[in-house]
Amino acid sequence: MDRNEAAKVFADLSVKLEHEGLTAGGTQPIRAALAGEHGEAFFAEFGGADIAIQERRIQDEEDPLLTVFLLKPDVRAVLLIGGRYASVIADSEKQLVAELDDMAQIVGLTARVAQSLTKAEIKRCLKGRNSCFVKGCGMLITGRSAGEAVTGAILLEKAAMTHILAKKIGGAKRVPLFSAALMHLVYQKKYSKINLHAEAERDIQAGTADVDRQGRSFREEELREQIVAYGKRLVEEGILQGTWGNLAVRLDETYMLATPSGLDYRYLTPDDIVKVELATLDYGSQRKPTSEKRMHRDLFAAREDVGACIHTHARLCGVFAAARRTVCCVSGEAKELIGEEICCAGHALPSTKKLSKVALKALGTRNACLLMNHGVICCGSDLAHAYLACKAAEQAAGEQLGVLETSR
């Protein structure tokens, strides 16, 4: 990586962080560092119209951001961000336990609070973890790529928000310890590699999945385009984040179409959508489909009226999932789209038969249910109605929490 390449990465980081609302909060500008290939690092601050870049030698510097590269050699990007909710946790807690699956996977079972930016404190708080809070600063995020660092920032800020807002409804409950430890291990050993590989190949192989377009019906082509369009729309509206969440549509009696695993929705193309056989969950030589393909298939099998379903880690529904509480749909539109309430399913590990079982029980004849310490799944007769159910669910959660801004 040279200075020009670093400038492009920093510019992209700035756009992503602003889009996610992470440039607000905190009294200091966002600081970022990128590791080069030969012991150098590039450093920048975000806060004004221009991004000033400095090049430094990692070994010669005492800057806390650069210290991280010495402590964690596989880290390529470091962010120091205030955050609206993270700043509150940093100044009031000693640590935050994982109350949502996504924090457990990426950060760990807990996120510690560093009392300062000294090397000893950073080492203590990042031991066995990818991120931590810092008193008076907000949060310190590391990533094996710039994209992974942004994802970590999104999830840690969301975890802080969940903990704070859940106090209004009885408080959040931690992810069961065994499940949290297992999910963290699996993510670090498996899914993070998928995400990193997809990110590395994105620029040179975007939309070049090994697919055979022959034999596709007009309906299939149209549905592929709809899945891409709605996925990007949900990202823009803050309901989907990065690669977290998935969409599936019933194609016919034999197949469904599902989003792939580990690809950012902003770069998704119709050819990336995976055609999955309902009976066997086989998908041939296509991209690997979402790990939640079983849950989508089982929902289609149980509900003939459902033609599409969307699983998200939406922020405000996530508060109720962490608190294991029901969302009461307060508006007529939400009631019509979803039902009288959004119940919370019992605990189950992601991608398991048990998750399908508890989700279907909580869903019943309604069009949305919460997944304990995980997220929400919404469905409808088609993708448009499933999308509206997602919006209505998040709006209902926001109304019950007394939060006007549902995603930012």
Image (tube, helix red, strand yellow):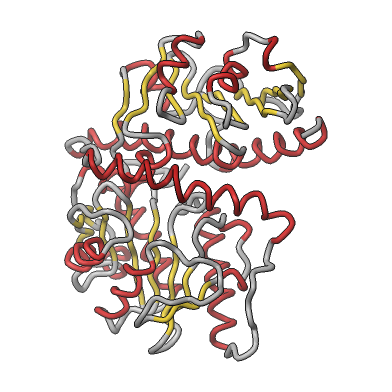
Query: In the image, is residue 127 above or below residue 162?
Result: above
Q: Quadrant of residue 15?
A: top right
Q: Quadrant of residue 363?
A: bottom left
Horizontally, is 389 left or right of 31 in the view? left
Horizontally, is 227 left or right of 385 in the view? right
Looking at the image, how many numbered discs can be counted on the residues?
Answer: 0
Name the residue: 67% across, 10% down.
61
Horizontally, is 359 left or right of 2 in the view? left
Query: In the image, is residue 126 above or below residue 164?
Result: above
| Image coordinates for residue 110, horizontal then vertical, percent | 33, 29
Name the residue: 53% across, 48% down.
193
| Image coordinates for residue 361, horizontal then vertical, percent | 17, 67
User: Which of the pair 288/232 is nearer the observer?
Assistant: 288
Query: In the image, is residue 221 above or below residue 137?
Result: below
User: Which of the pair 51/214 is nearer the observer?
Assistant: 214
Name the residue: 50% across, 78% down.
275
| Image coordinates for residue 70, horizontal then vertical, percent | 58, 19
Task: Assign the N terminus to one quadrant of the image.
Answer: top right
User: Which of the pair 314/69 is nearer the observer?
Assistant: 69
| Image coordinates for residue 160, horizontal then vertical, percent | 37, 32
Query: In the image, is residue 196 above or below residue 383?
Result: above
User: Which of the pair 98/21 is nearer the observer?
Assistant: 98
